[in-house]
Image: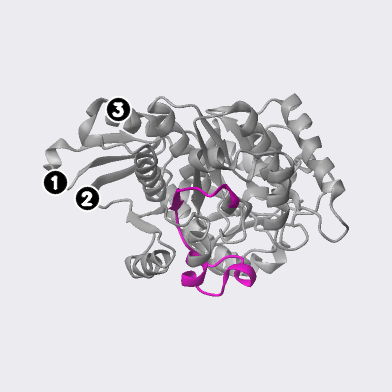
Amino acid sequence: MFGLPKFGDGIALHRLERFYQTHRIDRAGLARRSIAVTGTNGKGSTARFMTSVIEAAGLKVGCFTSPHLFDVRERFTLGDTPIAKEDFDRLAEIVLAFNRSLPEGDRMGGFEFLFLTAILWFQETKPDAIVWEAGIGGRYDPVRTVRASVSVLTSIDLEHTELLGGTEELIAYDKVDALAPGGCVILSPSIPEPLAHRIAAFAGLAGRATLPALASRRVTGIVNTHKGARFNYGFSAVAPAADQPVRLKLPGTHQVHNAITALRAAEIWLGFKPEENAERHFAMLAALGRTRWPGRLEKVSTSPDLWIDVGHTPRALDAVTRTFLDVSPRDRTLVVFGVSSSKEVAAISEIVASRFDHFILTRASRSGADTGLFEAIFRQHAQDVTLAPDTASAAIMARERAQRDGLSVVALGGLFLAAEIQRAWEGGDPREIDFL
């Protein structure tokens, strides 16, 4: 994208600080308006839930997320509206000009470029709040430079261990460092309690507070349907009969955790106490139910049904496959599967292969692992395994099979696979998608 590598030359923090100075970024205003979202899985969903909830409180909210499915402008929004193409092109050129001014060997990468474009756009549009999804980790991530006083930790899994550390504990500590000293990090229920205790101790050394999203709160009755998840939400000090029903458009217990974590972070950032304003509290709960987030176990087509999910870690695929079996019977599901070669191919394949019966194995044109690396795993679990040379062929095969046998199709294995299958299903060329 724009001729930039995925990663820049070394850690970018010094370049970001120079950009802020040369472009007169309002650092105090940026910090005051910012909330950071970190974690292995669930960051984008949580960021979108938080955007909806803060908007329901009457504020204008900017949101920066990654990755995108089809258009890079998906990453920059005010509410649900993405940045205009002319604004993106204009601001991108400012950032690229800055990059050209840097000495050889100290140039930026793709995520850094997009982050600085967002910085300029939000400086111009002046939203009341800005929700930032971190890229990798937190300690060395560009999002650390916004100095957010509230952050979220959505989940922890082994990822980017060469940079973040070889244990979940070290990775968690890295992500906590996206938060400014003296701030508060909200811990998702997805964080195991023993790890949460360790995170609290580490955070306290920098004067940071930790708050479990469910502290004094209660979530019961989680049910997944093809329309999304529903659950009851209330306060521990109040009788369960007073719990409020909440419906999400996104299915999965993991999405329930993302939603309530986002809600709690928004309350802390707003300084809002639900017991003091029931009307606003109900409006914020309702906003959770309006939130959409493309590519997160999303039904993108019907007759026959096509679902896609961008999960790309073993833990993410475990959650997604369990959830999908709540909405589609195992014997009525056809899985189109492919995984990026840089991911945990064997572990991800083992989870998916053990959960379903019918498979089409393929590879995405971008970074897809050869099917030979995981075909044997699927054949150990299932007899109905077909190979497709590319995602365009896989989409055609899956549609024909689904129409003939009355199956639902789900594309699993990661962002590139999901986006390419959807594009091919709609008649487009998967190779034309502009991934970063």
Q: What is the quadrant of residue 368 in the picture?
A: bottom right
Labels in figure, total: 3
Q: Earlier in the sequence, mark 2 or mark 3?
A: 2
Labelled pair 2, 1 in contact (Cβ < 8 Å): yes
- Please tell me which residue is depicted at 44% across the width and 51% down the height of the picture: 152
Residue behind mark 1: 237
With 281 as the anchor, is 209 left or right in this view? right
With 320 as the anchor, is 2 left or right in this view? right
433 is higher (above) or lower (below) than 153: above
Q: What is the quadrant of residue 228 in the picture?
A: top left
| Residue 148: in magenta span | yes
Closer to us: 302 or 320: 320
Separation (CA) of disc 2 from disc 3 = 19 Å
Closer to us: 407 or 345: 345
- Amino acid at the residue labelled 1: Ala
Separation (CA) of disc 3 from disc 1 = 19 Å
- Please tell me which residue is depicted at 23% across the width and 48% down the height of the picture: 218
- Please tell me which residue is depicted at 21% across the width and 32% down the height of the picture: 276
Residue behind mark 3: 280
Q: Earlier in the sequence, mark 2 or mark 1?
A: 2
Residue behind mark 2: 216
- Please tell me which residue is depicted at 49% across the width and 54% down the height of the picture: 180
Q: Kindly tell me whether residue 396 is visible in this rendering.
A: yes
Q: Kindly tell me whether residue 305 is visible in this rendering.
A: no
Crowding at dot 2, Cα within 10 Å, few <14 / some 14-19 / many 20+, comes out as few
